[in-house]
Amino acid sequence: MKKVVLAYSGGLDTSCCVKWLQDKGFEVICFSADLGSEFSPQELRKKARAGGVARIYVEDLREEFARDYILPSLKANAVYESKYVLSTALGRPLIAKYLVDIAHKEQAEYVAHGCTGKGNDQVRIDTTVKILGPKLKIIAPVREWELTSRESEIEYARNKNIPISATKDKIYSIDQNIWGISIEGGMMEDLNNAPDEAAYVLTKHIDKTPDKADYAELEFEQGVPVKVNGKKKKFLAIIELLNELGGKHCIGRTDLVEDRTVGIKSREVYEAPAAWILIRAHQELESVVLDKDTLGFKEIAGLKYAQLVYQGLWFSRLRRSLDAFMLLTQEKVTGTIKLKLYKGNISVVSRKSQYSLYKKDLATYGEKDQFNREDAKGFIEIFSLPYRER
């Protein structure tokens, strides 16, 4: 039999993919990446075996994901179209990398995934596979099969006795990892509808949040978060802690009509408490320690970085080149930012850094002001000269 390694999430699409590939004469080997998904490794193995797969690999990649994918993105303050912190987009190249590795190990000619024919993930996974394993053939059942909707997939699963958790009443497509959750589909496809509260996983409704604020004091060393409230922790542990703390206060919900790589607009709802807390703290620290020109250009470069990640170009030369620039900007991004978390809001309480470029004696309007006001007149004369002459 022909071997195919399927990127298996345990959700509706990939559960149907297993049976569809088997009916096409393939020996199906599943690979599941644990990036902090809704299914435990035990659940994934049980579901895959119930589907009759030959073998399943389940790899705990949370540490690698945090260190090698999320952290570079945080240093770049990468946010797509102002609202999406790229949680799913960052996970796809890592999944595809392991998909290629396991296909080589199993001597399989094919890899497969459950991405739709008009989504971003097909671009991200296919592009990564073509870069890292150009000889592999890619099968995307959802682009080929006769099933045209999630409702028809649910019916197919029932007819084939495929164990699934999705129902026609709970029709949302959810992708979850440690950096955030992506939610789409169902009644949210109508832009007149508010997001369904039942779809949220990490965050409490604003009406159910505490009436007392929590504080998060985040310490960074060269752009890397190392402590929370004075306690040293690994980056992964910091993310997990802030997801819990932020979720408690309804931090990190966004509702976005975004531009997909394939050209269509799509409505997506996201939850990312830790991501928004860390990005906000990192930006605040950079505003204190980076000079004006570096800060301004880094913002432009960060927008391009986010676009590259969104489009599945993680392994591109440009993305790696931008990483080199971002790394250089982080040399003095060391210090502490204290944040207040309350009723869906993140407020800055204090900023401290030994490399701070903020000088109170220059900024103050009080008696200890050291700024020479007479210099301002000459500066404005020169600054405005080209505009006056025009």
Image (cartoon, grey):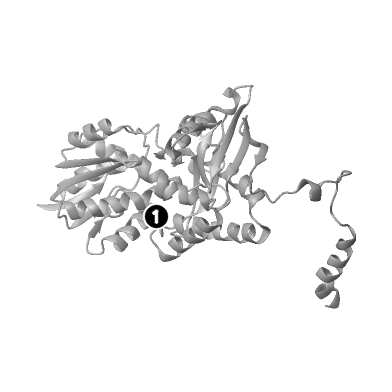
The image quarter in which residue 185 lies: top left
Residue 174 seen in this snapshot: no
Q: How many marks?
A: 1
Q: Is 56 on the left-hand or right-hand side of 273?
A: left
The image quarter in which residue 152 lies: top left
At which x and y percent is residue 148? 33, 48
Give the camera-side residue of 13 and 252: 252
Q: Quadrant location of the C terminus?
A: bottom right
Name the residue furthest bottom: 389
Give the camera-side residue of 123 and 386: 386
Residue depicted at 45% across the width and 47% down the height: 70
Name the residue furthest left: 1
Residue depicted at 53% across the width and 48% down the height: 223
Helix, strand or loop at mark 1: loop
Q: Is residue 366 above or below residue 371?
A: above
Residue depicted at 14% across the width and 55% down the height: 107
How many neighbours does mark 1 have within 10 angstroms: few (below 14), some (14-19), or many (20 or more)? some
Q: Is 85 on the left-hand or right-hand side of 20?
A: right
At which x and y percent is residue 321? 46, 64
Three-letter amino acid code at disc 1? Lys
The image quarter in which residue 237 lies: top left
Residue 37 seen in this snapshot: yes
Give the camera-side residue of 350 and 30: 350
Residue depicted at 62% across the width and 60% down the height: 294
At which x and y percent is residue 337? 62, 39
Return the residue at label 1. Answer: 118
Q: Is 122 on the left-hand or right-hand side of 219?
A: left
